[in-house]
């Protein structure tokens, strides 16, 4: 792990973000997501994963269970990413909509003001089968917002999709002391947006796809058409659609919809026309504010920028009738925060043989609380509540001066087997981890090991008696 605050003040820093959108059609997670998350990429590792799912199984028994425990998809991605040094920073669920944000440990002290929200648009706002879920945060002092949407289906509902998206934009964080969605420095908008390819017949669309002449379809893509006339969409940017439309496929295949569908009235419906329903777009506030002053906005003034490095679909995944889409981004920013609010370290050698000490210091403006705590975590911890044990910073404080404070942890709470661990300071006021230590070793409990060895020796000494009894057979 890099030392926190190692970046020079004012130096530009580039973070790599990997966004996923996938309508999973109530299916369970696949056996492997290595290619989806680009885990075998030869380039630099990702700093953040943002995963937006639609149609996660939301039957009432599943949903109630998921309210009490993490849902299978969250557990699945945590299992994949936590051994690689990522923690689930935040998540939000609204029936079938799920948004997960994972981040590398090193960035945790510089991520603040995390908030989530959701807006229902199904059944005139009373049902959450459609709508949007959002996670927002301050990242190195810049405001970032991620919005996962599932908009109304069917060719004829373009206006309804646009109306719903406007409603979602207006209602996220409404009435809270948080910037509006469009006031964030960067807004990522993604999901099953359900826009279709208008006018062209199914045979022309399929022939264009077979010949990889996707550009013939772009001008009739409903989202591209809407962006030309709707002012609030014109500020959103999208990479070129240089991959096959991601809907609708036969399950476990890369073949477009071959089955005739039957409606409630038993009339055969036409096969679904392929469409780019699954999309990732973004909006940079500074670029929007200065769009009318082209040439007047110097690079020196711009403190954050977004570069799309990769925008692709993944045809090998067949658990639903949608293919997942990913976007890999470079987020270049000048950190407005260079120092963590809390610096903390373990003192001396740690083992379960004695009480242990933690020292920490806070910046003068840190808003401490009696409910702040320091957690001991395994290095591959999954989320903020995945601690081994914790200490209250006020109740367990044993010394204090103007430069630092000391907190103790009881020996009874330290893992006997030892291993590699981290310390994290959790701020109740900020509802986030604001300080993280370097990894350190906890030594195994020698008393326990010696006891185990003695028990093994005694057990071994008794074995001849057992063997004698076997001679009778």
Image (tube, helix red, strand yellow):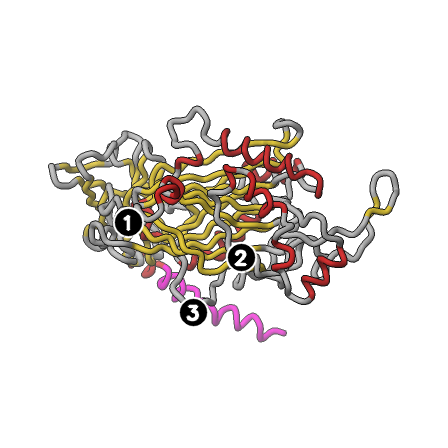
Q: Earlier in the sequence, mark 3 or mark 2?
A: 3
Relative horizontal placement of residue 38, taking residue 121 as reference (left or right): left
Q: Residue at x 53, y 33 (%)?
A: 168
Q: Residue at x 66, y 56 (%)?
A: 319
Q: Quadrant of the N terminus?
A: bottom left
Q: Residue at x 75, y 51 (%)?
A: 272
Residue 67's tag is none
Magenta: main secondary structure equals helix
Q: Is residue 85 visible?
A: yes
Residue 231 x/y as whole percent = 51, 37
Q: Check disc 1 and report its element: helix, strand or loop.
A: loop
Residue 138 x/y as whole percent = 35, 41
Dot in front, 2 or 1: 1
Q: Residues within 10 Å of mark 3 (few under 14, many from 20)?
A: few
Report the residue that reaches farthest toward the top.
Answer: 175
Q: In front here: 245 or 98?
A: 245
Q: Is residue 442 visible?
A: no
Q: Quadrant of the C terminus?
A: bottom right
Q: Which residue is mark 1?
A: 298
Residue 240's tag is 2
The picture quadrant where one finds residue 250 is: bottom right
Q: Which residue is mark 3?
A: 42
Q: Earlier in the sequence, mark 2 or mark 1?
A: 2
Separation of disc 2 and disc 1 at Cα?
26 Å
The picture quadrant where one finds residue 209 is: bottom right
Q: Which residues are magenta?
A: 452-473
Relative horizontal placement of residue 125, taking residue 377 as reference (left or right): right
Q: Earlier in the sequence, mark 3 or mark 1?
A: 3
**As drawn, 123 above or below 309:** above
Dot in front, 3 or 1: 1
């Amino acid at each position: 792990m890099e030392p926190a605050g190692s970046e020079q003040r004012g130096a530009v820093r580039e973070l790599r973000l990997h966004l996923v959108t996938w309508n999973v059609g109530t299916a369970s997670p696949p056996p492997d997501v290595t290619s989806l998350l680009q885990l075998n990429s030869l380039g630099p590792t990702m700093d953040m994963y943002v995963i937006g799912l639609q149609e996660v199984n939301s039957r009432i028994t599943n949903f109630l269970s998921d309210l009490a425990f993490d849902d299978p998809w969250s557990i699945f991605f945590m299992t994949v990413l936590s051994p690689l040094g990522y923690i689930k920073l935040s998540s939000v669920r609204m029936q079938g909509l799920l948004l997960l944000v994972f981040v590398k440990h090193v960035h945790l002290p510089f991520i603040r003001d995390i908030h989530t929200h959701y807006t229902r648009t199904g059944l005139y706002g009373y049902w959450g089968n459609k709508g949007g879920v959002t996670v927002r945060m301050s990242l190195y002092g810049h405001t970032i917002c991620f919005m996962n949407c599932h908009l109304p289906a069917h060719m004829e509902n373009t206006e309804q999709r646009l109306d719903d998206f406007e409603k979602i934009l207006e209602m996220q964080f409404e009435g809270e002391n948080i910037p509006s969605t469009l006031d964030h420095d960067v807004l990522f908008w993604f999901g099953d947006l359900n826009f279709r390819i208008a006018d062209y017949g199914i045979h022309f669309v399929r022939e264009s796809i077979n010949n990889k002449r996707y550009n013939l379809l772009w001008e009739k893509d409903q989202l591209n058409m809407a962006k030309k006339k709707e002012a609030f969409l014109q500020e959103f940017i999208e990479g070129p659609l240089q991959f096959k439309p991601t809907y609708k496929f036969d399950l476990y295949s890369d073949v477009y919809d071959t089955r005739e569908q039957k409606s409630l009235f038993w009339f055969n419906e036409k096969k679904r026309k392929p469409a780019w329903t699954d999309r990732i777009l973004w909006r940079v506030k500074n670029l929007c504010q200065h769009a009318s002053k082209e040439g007047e906005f110097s690079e020196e003034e711009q403190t954050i920028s977004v570069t799309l490095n990769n925008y692709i679909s993944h045809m090998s995944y067949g658990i639903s009738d949608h293919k997942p889409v990913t976007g890999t981004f470079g987020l270049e920013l000048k950190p407005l925060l260079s120092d963590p609010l809390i610096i903390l370290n373990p003192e001396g050698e740690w083992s379960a043989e004695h009480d242990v000490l933690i020292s920490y210091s806070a910046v003068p403006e840190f808003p401490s609380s009696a409910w702040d705590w320091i957690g001991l975590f395994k290095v591959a911890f999954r989320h903020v509540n995945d601690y081994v044990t914790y200490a209250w910073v006020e109740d367990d404080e044993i010394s204090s001066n103007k430069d630092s404070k000391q907190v103790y942890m009881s020996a009874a709470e330290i893992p006997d087997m030892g291993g590699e661990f981290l310390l994290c300071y959790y701020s109740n006021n900020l509802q986030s981890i604001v300080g993280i230590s370097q990894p350190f070793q906890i030594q195994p409990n020698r008393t326990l090991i010696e006891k185990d060895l003695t028990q093994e020796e005694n057990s071994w000494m008794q074995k001849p008696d057992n063997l004698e009894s076997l001679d009778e057979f």
